[in-house]
Image (cartoon, grey):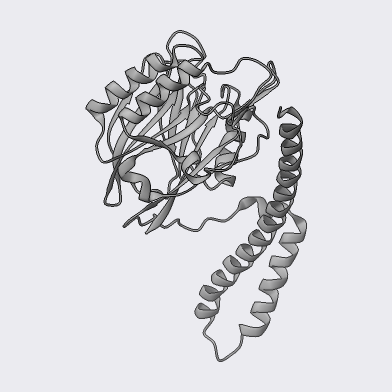
Amino acid sequence: MANLNLISMNVRGLNMPAKRSKALAEFQRLKGDVIFVQETHFREGSAPGFRNARYPTGYFSNFGETKSRGVAILFARHVPFTLQDVVTDPQGRFLMVKGMLGNTKLTFVNVYLPNRLQTKCLRKVLRRLSKFQEGFVVLGGDCNVSLDMPADCVQGGGSSVPSLRVQFRKLLSADRLIDCWHLSNPAVKDYTFYSHVFKKYSRIDYFFVEHKALEMVRSCKIGPITWLDHAPLLLSLALPNLVRTENAWRLNESLLSDPMTRAEVIASLENYFLENDTDDVRPATVWEAHKCVLRGAFNQLGTRRKKERTARTEELLREITALELTHKSDLDP
């Protein structure tokens, strides 16, 4: 049994190279295996590349008329996903990808619903899904609907009307789709989006799974809102017989640009040869073994640098979360 970590995030456009790099780095920092991205703003026929060594595989549904809308699903390189079929939407509102993960058949559905006529759009998605789906369904994305008002919304205006929420919930119930975050946090109030226009927090980003897949849900969390106006939504699923692909070791070349790192590695090598380059050890053996020593030194230094960077990042995120909680409390009526 292994955990599969899914992330859903509305990125509000990825046509700037720096923003694409930042998004991919954020997905990696959050240890995402499968990433649901909304509002890529890629135009069909002229979309830029959106991948790196960590996330080499992606599927996209782009809008053909303007640089708006657009959704994507990315897979980390260590995820042994075997694709079977893909359905895209010419309006850039949804994307369906199905295939095998280990011995488990899954259908991933990423949606970006409009800010009006949400129920009509969802009905269209679910109708298409009924003809496409196989195995377990995981539906996620930005639905532009707050389902549990007022609990899921701190208002300053522009809230979802009750009739829309009722209709939306009925559609989900008919397909036996369960809100993973609410399931995991029944007594918690939190939000995934902050509207600067209306000065309002709301929970409009979701992961849904079918009733039969509830036992797979390990956790569902909302991250802090940092560089976007949407928070990342993090879902952890437990999948049987999921074996991750082994990653080949590669030197982190950025370590070579650090003079202190170079000095420590040189010192380790000098000490190794001083202790092992003796008459009773064959030169070929000494040479082959030094590669392991070199690799170990770089791994140790890389791990230390990563821990320092992670500690600083976590400290900043704790500060952001504390400020965010204060801001939410100030707006809470």
Image spot of residue 86 (x, y percent): 30, 29
Depth check: 73 or 4 in front?
4
Image spot of residue 9 (x, y percent): 54, 32
Q: Quadrant of the N terminus?
A: bottom left
Residue displayed at 61% across by 88% down? 278
Image spot of residue 174 (x, y percent): 31, 28
User: Image quarter for residue 91?
Assistant: top left
Image spot of residue 312 (x, y percent): 74, 51
Q: Quadrant of the C terminus?
A: top right
Give the farthest residue toward the top: 65
Residue 73 vertical position relative to residue 145 in the rendered view, above or below? below
Depth check: 78 or 165 in front?
165
User: Image quarter for residue 301?
Assistant: bottom right
Residue 136 vertical position relative to residue 65 in the rendered view, above or below? below
Could you tell whether 31 is left or right of 119 in the image? right
Residue displayed at 73% across by 66% down? 264
